[in-house]
Image: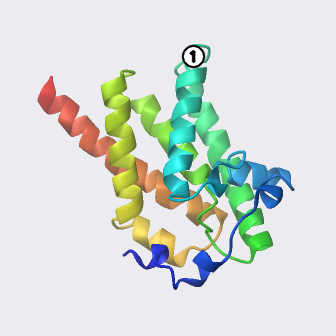
């Protein structure tokens, strides 16, 4: 389950530089403006950056618009992930974080807009993104393309939402 994060994994021997992250529009999108270059734990940094952007933009963006933004981020992210993976020569490189950004936007659009629920969404998403329960593990391991990169995070967001929905249902 955690082989992806092991130092001996060839994926972890390729580093994305800041120059590479800003060398092509796909790389900018895939690294979410270089956020994926930050070490350690680029996925967590990407999720945090997505959360910050969500909080900053939410006062000016109508609630229902987030679902169009999420859909556009999924499609654009799939293209950017594929192009960046091809250019790095590594499928689903750790510096590709648009999948985390899109997924946290989706999840934050589905939970109450309070700090406690946003923190819970962040923690739940990171847990399910790292653990990769089925079928997310299948897409992470077998579908090594832009669509698969985005889809396994969508599934992690779905698991996180189910848990948060259950907590909300029990709480209220």
Displayed quadrant of residue 167: top left
- Residue placed most toward the observer, 6 or 85: 6
Q: Residue at x 72, y 45 (%)?
A: 33
Vertical arrangement, residue 87 with respect to residue 150, above or below: below
Residue 11 spot, x, y in % from top left = 60, 78
Residue 115 spot, x, y in % from top left = 36, 24
Report the residue that reaches farthest toward the right: 23
- Residue placed most toward the observer, 151 or 80: 80
Report the residue that reaches farthest toward the top: 59
Vertical arrangement, residue 163 with respect to residue 7, above or below: above
Vertical arrangement, residue 32 with respect to residue 113, above or below: below
Residue 110 spot, x, y in % from top left = 40, 31
> Is residue 140 rendered to the left or right of residue 75?
left
Q: Which residue is mark 1?
A: 62
- Residue placed most toward the observer, 106 or 56: 56
- How many discs mark residues in the rendered view? 1
- SS of the residue at dot 1? loop
């Amino acid at each position: 389950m955690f082989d992806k994060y092991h130092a001996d994994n060839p994926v972890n021997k390729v580093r994305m530089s800041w120059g590479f992250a800003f060398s092509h529009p796909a790389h900018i999108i895939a690294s979410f403006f270089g956020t994926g270059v930050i070490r350690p734990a680029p996925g967590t940094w990407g999720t945090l950056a997505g959360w910050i952007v969500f909080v900053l933009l939410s006062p000016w963006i109508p609630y229902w618009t987030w679902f169009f933004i999420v859909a556009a981020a999924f499609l654009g992210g799939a293209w950017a992930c594929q192009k960046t993976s091809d250019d790095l020569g590594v499928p689903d490189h750790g510096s590709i974080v648009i999948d985390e950004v899109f997924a946290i936007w989706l999840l934050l659009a589905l939970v109450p807009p309070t700090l406690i629920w946003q923190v819970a969404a962040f923690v739940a998403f990171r847990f399910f993104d790292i653990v990769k329960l089925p079928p997310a593990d299948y897409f992470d391991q077998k579908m090594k393309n832009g669509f698969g990169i985005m889809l396994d995070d969508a599934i992690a967001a779905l698991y996180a939402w189910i848990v948060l929905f259950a907590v909300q249902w029990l709480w209220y």
